[in-house]
Image (cartoon, rainbow, N blue to C red):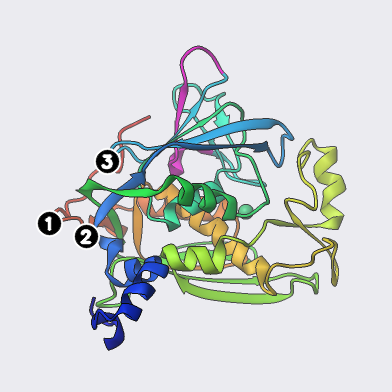
Amino acid sequence: MDGLPPAFDSRTLEARLLDRRFGDVAERRSGAAGSRQRTLKRPIGCVGVGLHSGRRVELTIAPAPANSGIVFHRTDLGPTPVEIAARYDRVVDTRLCTVLASAARPEAEVGTVEHLLAALAGSFVDNAVITIDGPEVPVLDGSAAPFLFLLDCAGIVDQESPRRWIEILRPVRVTEGEGSVALLPAAAGAPLGLDMAMTIDFAASAIGHQDLALRLDPLSLRHDLAAARTFTLAAEIAHLRATGRALGGSLDNAVVVDGARVLNPGGLRMPDEFVRHKLLDAVGDLALAGAALHGRFVGRCSGHALNNRLLRVLFADPAAWREAGSSQATTPRPLVAAA
Ligand SMILES: [Zn+2]
């Protein structure tokens, strides 16, 4: 409990009430980030439409054993569920959202995984099975808030195994045009975790220049990122629809910007909702590392493609990372078995 103001340690009634009311604050300050793996207490599900396919899908998030990671199960492709590991090297498309495919059956895909993965990663959920009966995770309201609500309803439990961390040992960068992303080693003495910074620049003046920096943890996910919705430019919608995408998109699940105007009747949820969503996307995409990251992430005008390339560059260089933080084990080894 180091670093807490004295009032929190005095165990007065007020302090205990505060602890209970702001349990996630206490969790952050007690160093939960470095402790044990976590999964859901019980399964929980939802129904919705895919943003790009427009298809109705049913999704269930269920507990999973320690060290199994996040795995999707497509249940609509035959009598046996098709497994799709939520891992950077299973990414097959990043044009509008992040799409994963099964190694054994490449035609089995699951798309728009990033907001759900961000909710799981930011909540420090290491292991879960996500059962889905269609090719795309439901978009719901275009943010991660509904997924966070599901996790809250299900509850989260610690598991026996220590949390696995990937420590960034030296900088890796990917640049393309105006966009760039980098993973850098943590500052000396920094606690386990990922410090993140994002900058965006859009010609549309409703977005303009925005930047945001934060440390990823359950509290910052909940208060700074989860509610930020996906967004698009009005001028792009006709093109997307003509190419068979954004078929499930509406003002109920995306912010639509036309120059200086936000077309959604309710306006924005926060003035810098756009950069918050970009950072949320990065959290979801980086969750595909297969374990939590210890270091710093810096993004500029980045998107799913750059985020994924960054992980591929990182793991292609064994000198750029190692497993760290879990008990005494720091020996590099393959992240996960082939799936
Ligand atoms: Zn997004």
Image coords of residue 82 (percent x, y): 47, 22
Near mark 2 (Cα within 10 A), the count class, few <14, some 14-19 or many ≥20, is some
Image coords of residue 13 (percent x, y): 31, 78
Residue position for label 2: 325
- Please state the extent of the stretch shown in magenta in the rendering: 77-91
Residue at the left extreme of this rendering: 328
> Taking the image as drawn, is residue 184 in sight?
no
Task: Name the residue type under label 2.
Answer: Gly
Taking the magenta stretch, the answer to whether it contains residue 83 is: yes
Residue at the bottom extreme of this rendering: 6
Residue position for label 1: 328
The disc, 3 or 1, on the residue closer to the chain's N-terminal end is 3
Residue position for label 3: 66
Near mark 3 (Cα within 10 A), the count class, few <14, some 14-19 or many ≥20, is some
Taking the magenta stretch, the answer to whether it contains residue 45 is: no
For the residues labelled 3 and 1, the Cα–Cα distance comes to: 18 Å
Residue at the front extreme of this rendering: 13
- Mark 3 secondary-structure assignment: loop
For the residues labelled 3 and 2, the Cα–Cα distance comes to: 16 Å
Q: Quadrant of the N terminus?
A: bottom left
Q: Judge whether 272 appears above or below 257 on screen.
A: below
Q: Judge whether 122 appears above or below 10 on screen.
A: above
Which residue appears at 86% of the width and 56% of the height? Answer: 235
Depth check, mark 3 against mark 2: the one in front is: 3
Task: Name the residue type under label 3.
Answer: Ala
Image check: 259 left or right of 87?
Answer: right
The quadrant where residue 207 appears: bottom right
> Taking the image as drawn, is residue 107 in sight?
yes
